[in-house]
Amino acid sequence: MDGKINRGFSLTELLVAMAVGAVVLTGATQLFKSGMDATVSVTQRGEMEENVRAALNLVARDASMAGSGLPSGGLTLPYGGASNGVSLIGVDQNAKTWINANQYISGNVGTPPIAFSNYMFGVIPRPANGMEKGGPVSVPAMAASGVLPDSATFIYVDYSFPLNQYIVTFPDNTGTSINVAPPAVPPPNFPAILSPNGIVVGDLILLTNPTGSAIGEVTGINPGGTVLTFANLDPLNINQSGAASGNIKYIDPCSAAGGCTGSAPPLLPPNTTTVAYRVYAVTYFLEVPAAAGQTPRLMRQVNSQPAIPVADNIIAMQITYDMCTAVVVAGCSGQSNPIAAGYSPNQIEKANITMTGQSVTNYGNKSKSIAISTSVSTRNLTFTNRYQ
């Protein structure tokens, strides 16, 4: 033996080492947690922005198309005579009503203004009416502010299907059906009425001729796709053949000619040609799915088709309208309810849309929300370019 004694660590040295190790371990843990929190935060923000921007782009696109192809200022819907009340929006083929205030609105048209009680404007504002009928009035994310989401309906002609190139005739003077035939020499790949992108039951059809314009809801299509039927008691209450005006019968050339007899309509002057277009009435609102734990989502409902979700985790949608851009007048900007303020929807020059989304990832009950806004000119109503 060399006489040396092998000594271990003293208690003091061990305690100091443990303390230093704990500090280092705590720092590493905090660093790791900070990194994880940052990763989750970035993921949440990415999810939110993706959902909100998708929703915002959809609404802005339809808002920018509002009024396109409609008669200037919109058009009257059935009224007078044996009319069957106000026409509807937000109702589908299964008779499900998706939003609470679902009637076409009253408004003033023209100069001097004339009041109409059943009128199709290019934009139908619905402030504080943005929750699905039958669902919750609001959600916890909205309750603190007390602000309810808005809904809105944007109406425009769909030019993707060339219905305006079909030859339209009226089989009788009832205004409950039309015959449609392709042109004598159709272009290559000319789509049929019953093609995948063609006409379906529930579509709205705009008919225009020198007598005027009228809208009908398709309630039936014959197997050959040559006859479109517009029966009464349709889901949107637009086909009112007993009304005095504003219906298909009112513009039917057969009625003007004293009735169509025989198997073919009478020979009418060329200027009585009727042109048909498909119209989209697109309504946006929020829905809270019935399944437990689901968050609100943005819904899009077209004509009388069922509403479909287009963006998840959307907790609020606010839309205001500017009635002036070139010359600003007190009170004409940022109107959430322009009709109550005395304006006509035809005076809307810009829609200001704010969409609020909530993060899908709920990390430790720390979900986040984000609001993104955009403005879009309603170029088919009273568009004004302030830079000119």
Image (cartoon, rainbow, N blue to C red):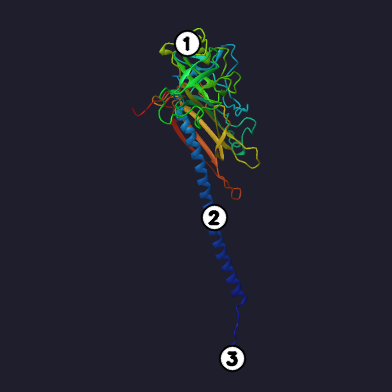
Element class at badge 3: loop
Q: Few, some or many C-alpha atoms within 10 Å of disc 1 (few <14, some 14-19, many ≥20)?
A: some
Q: Is residue 371 visible?
A: no
Q: Secondary structure at mark 2?
A: helix
View extreme (left): residue: 388
Where 112 falls versus 236 (above or below)?
Answer: above
Q: Is residue 356 visible?
A: yes
Three-letter code, disc 2? Met
Estimate the spatial distance between the alpha carbons at disc 1 and disc 3, rounded to whole Å: 131 Å
Number of the front mark, 1 or 3: 1
Answer few, some or many: residues within 10 Å of disc 2's Cα (few below 14, many 20 plus, some between 14 and 19).
few
Q: Which residue is mark 3?
A: 3
What residue is shown with label 2?
36
**Amino acid type, label 1:** Pro
Image coords of residue 299 (percent x, y): 56, 34
Residue bearing mark 1: 266
